[in-house]
Image: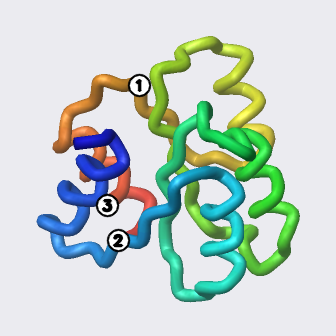
Amino acid sequence: MTVRQQVGAILTQAGYIVMEAVDGVEGAEAIASHKDIVMVVCDVNMPRMNGLDMVSKVKSEQVNADLPIIMLTTEGNPELIKQAKNAGAKGWILKPFKADQLLTTVQRLTS
């Protein structure tokens, strides 16, 4: 099971409706075409468009100004964290992660 599938399973079991994307391009397109998305969880390292670029692209649209985005990644570099926050990410969770840590962060940012 991929991390994306694990995240999807955890959030689905907690009652969230989950949409998955295989890369940053598909993620940005999904966000642009589904205006009812209330939270995004993405990685820094994704094919075709990395997470930092995806966050910047998504946040460049005024309609997404308040959309919370959490970075879930193995990258702990403080400079990357700063770049992500400057781009508009609201949270940073390091892999490996615990389900309750993810759920707590999602609940805090969606309530």
Mark 2 falls on what kind of element?
A: loop
Residue 88 versus residue 6: which sits nearer the camera? 6
Q: Earlier in the sequence, mark 1 or mark 2?
A: 2
Residue at the image point whose x is 21% and y is 68% from the top: 12
**Quadrant holding the C terminus:** bottom left
Mark 1 falls on what kind of element?
A: strand
Q: Which mark is residue 52?
A: none
Query: To which residue does mark 2 refer?
Result: 18
Please say if 55 is above or below 96. below
Name the amino acid type tagged 3. Gln
Real-space Cα distance between discs 3 and 1?
A: 17 Å
Query: To which residue does mark 1 refer?
Result: 94
On the rendered structure, is 73 left or right of 57?
left
On the rendered structure, is 88 left or right of 27?
right
Residue 56 versus residue 88: which sits nearer the camera? 56
Residue 90 versus residue 52: which sits nearer the camera? 52
Name the amino acid type tagged 2. Val
Residue 109 occupies quadrant: bottom left
Tell me where residue 53 appears, x and y as whole percent. 79, 44
Q: Which mark is residue 107?
A: 3
